Amino acid sequence: MVNMPATPFDELESDLTTGGAESALERLAARFRDDGDYHSLFDTRLMQARRRLGLPIILTTPLEELEEPMRGEVERAYLDACREAGWLLWKAGKLREAWMYLRPLGENSAVAAAISQVDANEENLASLVEIALREGVAPANGFELVLRQYGVCNAITAFDSEMGQHSRAQQQIAAGLLVRQLHSDLFANLRADIARRAEGAPEQGTLPELLSGRDSLFADNNYHIDTSHLSATVRIARIVEDPEILGLAWELTEYGRRLSVTFQLTGDEPFEDVYRSHGLFFAAQLGREIEAAVAYFRNKADNANPDEMGTATAEVYVVLLIRLRRFSDAFEEHVRLMPAGVRTTGFAPTVLELARLSGNYDRLLAICRQRGDLLGFAAGLLEMKKADR
């Protein structure tokens, strides 16, 4: 009689008889791991944990109904199983499935580091963008993937729809990437146009240097970059504080100012005159036209009706003062222009933050008394005591 090879079921039954339940389950887990069946490995680890804790193999009691310390033990076992299965799936390139297990761990810094090591390709790109950008694990990395793989248009859409929910630091990184890319593309396109005209153009330099003495580049409504991308990138660059990126953004406004009137798009106040106003905003932060910029945005803020236009115009003016390190002025103008309880866009810091920057805690407390803002008064007192330590 020919002996038939043992099936996995026969082996499991034999393991259980000869080695006991724990040994059998461990060998079963090893089989699933070797076969790449990580979902079954996860379920096996939970089965092992429930048996070890004296719970039914198939747990029917909701976790929230378990008493401590049993509940904590089950949660730890669950997270350990998530960690094992999640990273095995990640190494296997199954990123979306891996994230299903890695998400509950809350160990986003480790996932962000892993994302930076993955070479993006057609198979994993959508998953990388989903995890990095939309799930917020590494927003700037995700934005860079969109920019590099899908282009400027999609990156602008991603910035407007996704980046607002992430930190200011992540937004600034993403904005910097966009400004660099558009500036690089525009510089290359300008050089190519100049070369077609049989004129010499420097390999490196600034946009204004390329444009100097070459008004003919804009004749007949000519342009060298998608003008909607240009205006959107200039708008997004408002959040930038890095001097190098600000310099590139200012150069983009210098190009925009030379475009035909056909492409001089109208923006929202205080940036209605898109390229001139943004140019002033960026230039002042670079140490140029400071007083002209302050006067321009003060005038805009003074003439904006917050009941009709909201606080955006006043916030831009306050932010400019902050970036010029005029903290006391920023504090007073915030108080003057934005009434108590008004809902802001979040572009400008709160009065409490401005009190911290300027050291005007006494003034803050007086204003809170005047406004009947007891909560603000409490926060100001606490911050003042902390600053005095």
Image (cartoon, rainbow, N blue to C red):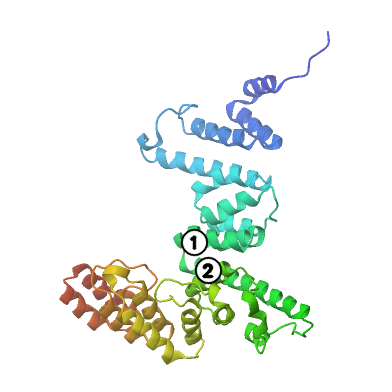
Asked whether the beta carbons under mark 1 and mark 2 sit within 8 Å of each other, the answer is: yes
- State the residue position of label 2: 232
Q: Is residue 383 left or right of residue 374?
A: right
Name the residue at the top extreme.
1
Q: Position of residue 218 (x, y in %)?
A: 64, 79
Q: Give percent across and percent down for residue 376.
A: 24, 70
Picture layout, residue 171 above or below residue 320: above
**Which quadrant of the figure contains the N terminus?**
top right
Amino acid residing under circle 1 = Asp
Report the side of 139 relative to 66 (left or right). Answer: right
SS class of the residue under badge 2?
helix
Q: In front: mark 1 or mark 2?
A: 2
Q: Which quarter of the figure is the C terminus placed in?
A: bottom left
Q: Quadrant of residue 68?
A: top left
The tag earlier along the polypeptide, 1 or 2, is 1
- Find residue 65 and report its horizontal and vertical position in percent: 35, 34
Amino acid found under the numbered disc labelled 2 = Ala
Determine which of the numbered discs, if any, sits on residue 160 in the image: 1
Comparing 55 with 20, the one in front is 55
